[in-house]
Amino acid sequence: MRRLIFSLSTILIFAFYVALNRQSSNAAGNKIAAALQTPTSTAITAPSDPAPSFPQSSPVQSLPPPKKSQGMYADGTYTGSPADAYYGTVQVAAVISGGKLSNIKFLQYPSDTGHSVYVSEVALPMLKQEAIQAQSANVDIVSGATETSGAFQQSLQSALSRAKS
Amino acid sequence: MKETRIIMGMPVTVEVVSDKVKQKDIDDVFSYFRYVDEKFSTYKEDSEISKINRGEVSEDSYSKDMVEILRLSEDTKRETDGYFDITAPDGMIDPSGIVKGWSIYNASKILQEKGFSDFYVDAGGDIQTGGKNSKGEKWSVGIRNPLKQEEIVKVVYVNGEGVATSGTYIRGRHIYNPKNRKDALDEIVSLTVVGPNIYEADRFATAAFAMGESGIGFIERLSGFEGYAINRNGIASMTSGFEKYTND
């Protein structure tokens, strides 16, 4: 009898635990579903946000396309003037080799890391998370959304005009 | 052979790994991007898209590429619950969110048709890779730290996939979720998507970025896509299969 009561209560506790868990994961799931279905939950929509759209959305459109780039620039590294993005200053340097633009270096960029507090309660529980960490910059290609900013283009334009041979 | 030019207001880089590549091959790719810019730039008065927005072109005389882009935009809007929409509140259409990935993918096909298999095409940080790099390895693609531009915070190794990053660097303009004010703390500032090609990766990166924090969950549910989202506190969330790309 004691054994029976013990196993029954174990089962009951387990069932309660499962029910509790399910409830909380359902709540998370519903929240995501709601967020997906009601775009009104935030003011963000794809077309109105300038960042992910085409770079032409930048205020600086006057960048002259190099006609024939061969021999257009003299080799060297040219520093562009600092340009104001309203959240900070952007400054780049253009590296020219063989008369062509071969690299763009960031000299100044706003590095506001914001609050250091880590609030995890609204994070997706099933996805792995990590704090980002600097890696070796020795890569073939870089993926990022920076190059579309107006300040970037402004600084680059001034660097390239200095590089003109 | 590798070259960068500024087209459509952004650096476009083409690298082809082959003994046979000629300057003309690279030039052809850049010419294609210029053609796309002439047709789809909303900043060019005489582009087809500007003419359409001014009501100067009847629908039956749209070019073949325009018809295709409008169709792809409609498809993407449907597939993303309306998060991807090329129609602005003022009724003007701006298909640039779909044109970028589409044109990078088409540019890579130009190289393939010329017989090249090892290359990449990078337009403003959105990349289509093909084959291997000059060392015979997979292409290594660094994800830029959205909070500190000179830094790479993750490296993915790809051969043939597309890698697209959507992001914002705007500070001070916090968009609050009215239902949960804490959302602003976790605001996503960068979302990188690895997909079967850059057209697919780019359109879903754009849409998922607009979804804010739930965007990474959207990518998680798409089969064949992996994602890496970084919030403004420097905390990254990755999809469950993302790490298959982080080992070379």
Image (cartoon, rainbow, N blue to C red):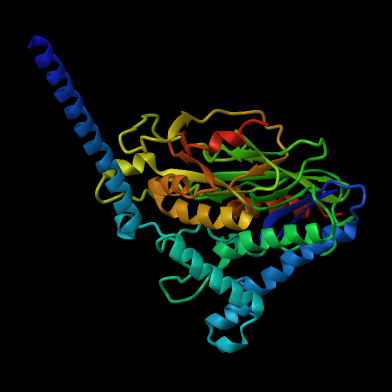
Asked if residue B102 shows in the view, the reply is yes
Q: Residue at x 50, y 67 (%)?
A: B75
Is A117 on the left-hand or right-hand side of A21? Answer: right
* Residue B110 drawn at (x, y percent): 78, 62
Is A162 on the left-hand or right-hand side of B55? Answer: right
Q: Which residue is nearer to you in this view: B110 or B38?
A: B110
The single residue placed furthest to the front in the displayed view is A1
Residue B180 occupies quadrant: top left
* Residue A80 drawn at (x, y percent): 70, 47
The single residue placed furthest to the left in the displayed view is A1
Q: How many labels, in total?
A: 0
Assign the C terminus of chain B to one quadrant of the image.
Answer: top right
Q: Is residue A108 above or below residue B98?
A: above
Q: Residue at x 26, y 42 (%)?
A: A26
* Residue B66 drawn at (x, y percent): 61, 76
Q: Is residue B76 above or below residue A137?
A: below
Q: Is residue B90 above or below residue B195?
A: below
Is B29 on the left-hand or right-hand side of B38? Answer: right
* Residue B1 drawn at (x, y percent): 86, 48
Q: Which residue is nearer to you in this view: B137 or B141?
A: B137
Asked if residue B42 shows in the view, the reply is no
Q: Which residue is nearer to you in this view: B107 or A102?
A: B107
Is A156 on the left-hand or right-hand side of B206? Answer: right
Q: Residue at x 13, y 20 (%)?
A: A8
Q: Which residue is nearer to you in this view: B237 or B174?
A: B237
